[in-house]
Image (cartoon, grey):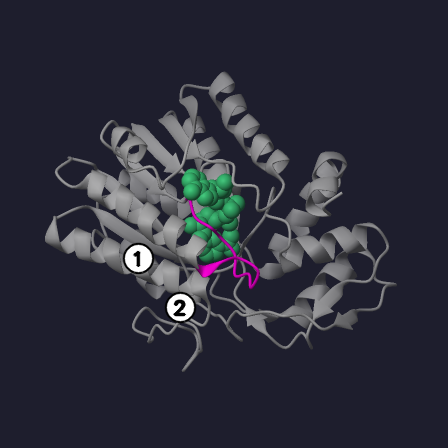
Amino acid sequence: MDVLVTGGAGFIGGHLAERFVRDGHDVVVLDNFDPYYDVRLKEHNVEAGRAAAADGDGSYRLVEGDVRDAELVAELVTSTDVVSHHAAQAGVRADIDPRKYHEVNVDGTLNVLDAARGTDLRRVVLASSSSVYGTAQYLPYDEAHPTKPVSPYGASKLAAERYGMVYADRYNLPIVALRYFTVYGPRMRPGMAISNFVSRCANGEPPEIYGDGSKTRDFTFVEDIVSVNRTLLESDAADGETMNVGSGGTISIEELAETVRDAMAPELDLIYTTGYDIDAEHTHASVEKAGELLGYEPTRTIEEGVAEFVEWYRENQEWYEPLVRGE
Ligand SMILES: NC(=O)c1ccc[n+]([C@@H]2O[C@H](COP(=O)([O-])OP(=O)(O)OC[C@H]3O[C@@H](n4cnc5c(N)ncnc54)[C@H](O)[C@@H]3O)[C@@H](O)[C@H]2O)c1
């Protein structure tokens, strides 16, 4: 199958592109190598995709370009079977202009959706986010939970996802939106709690917690994200549906720091620092819907996933650590 992975040089898109190639698909990656984190990490992701192509039956082609370029997007979307739309200004950050979130995440998605009209695409997957929920009225979130984002990022992901569902309905397109809950694993983006804690512990530095560590998160191992996306390539279930993809578990940031510390450097204390964070207090996914529609089952507890990431980190410390530590 021909698969277009937008944002395929990024963390999640990189894993998807690599796996799709290993599964024998012909993958085209569209990515603009946005420098909001070290682009050398993205180059490693591309290398992984190319290595998969060198090993197996699938192929890998990189197109350096922008999802805001409607003409380029149309050209790529109309010459593929599946679109896996993962390009985005990701991350809830206060220092990024809301307009950038809007232009990349909303306008970029509209370019994909407009190009999809009138095609016979087999599937369009839109990467959405738990950030669409905002403040929790109850937990775990099911998909019927009210959506009231508390960040421009969350607002942009919600708008993009809603456009997707409108296009699915109006133009009868096979679109699915997946609300990912904080994703982690090998080659993860810098500046996230798990990569920060692991890199500090690896260097004998106490893990540093922003705030009091009482925020709770549902952390999802990247392999589980890959698995649900592979299912969507094979199945035509769930058209026009939006669903959570999380681990179904939850842990406070303080407990997470303890878990990493206990696994890597039990002698270290935790330290607390003031940090500005504009994201939700708590996230926790109900994954029942993805389970019913797609047979989705998370495979790692946070302890198992952290242990796996720590092992990968140690094996890849030489190249990964300077990138994740901004050195
Ligand atoms: N990582 C998470 O915890 C998480 C959680 C929820 C949702 N998501 C969503 O999953 C998707 C992938 O996230 P990620 O963590 O891999 O982030 P990432 O930043 O590693 O990947 C996004 C990729 O998109 C590319 N990109 C950015 N702007 C672009 C543009 N204008 N044109 C083309 N490419 C562009 C970037 O260069 C990057 O390689 C995003 O849609 C994100 O919103 C991620």
Q: Position of residue 223 (x, y in %)?
A: 50, 46
Q: Is 327 situated left or right of 131 in this image? A: right
Q: Which residue is mark 2?
A: 286
Q: Nearer the viewer, residue 248 or 279?
A: 279
Is residue 298 visible from the viewing direction of this image? no
Q: In the figure, residue 233 lies in which quadrant?
A: top left
Rendering quarter of residue 321:
top right
- Which amino acid, mark 1? Glu
Task: Please tell me whether residue 327 is drawn above or below residue 53 in the rendered image.
Answer: below
- Front label number (2 vs 1): 1
- Residue 16 in the image: state x and y as whole percent: 44, 38
Would you identify the image quadrant in which residue 241 lies? bottom left
> Contact (CB < 8 A) between labels 2 and 1?
no
Identify the residue at horizontal 38%, vertical 60% (top origin): 156
Q: Which residues are magenta?
A: 87-98
The residue shown at (28%, 42%) is: 112
Q: Quadrant of the N terminus?
A: top left
Distance from label 2 to label 1 (Cα)? 18 Å
Query: Left or right: 218 with respect to 187?
Result: left
Which of the two labelled residues, at mark 2 and mark 1, occupies the earlier sequence position? 1
**Residue found 75% across the figure and 51% down from its top:** 199
Task: Point out the image quarter for the C terminus.
Answer: top right
Q: Which residue is mark 1?
A: 161
Q: Is residue 14 left or right of residue 327?
A: left
Mark 2: which secondary structure? loop
Disc 1 secondary structure class? helix
Q: Give the camera-side residue of 285 and 137.
A: 137
Question: Mostly what secondary structure, the magenta segment?
Answer: loop
Left or right: 115 as drawn, with respect to 207:
left
What residue type is disc 2 on? Ser
Q: Residues within 10 Å of mark 2 (few under 14, many from 20)?
A: many
Q: Is residue 189 magenta?
A: no
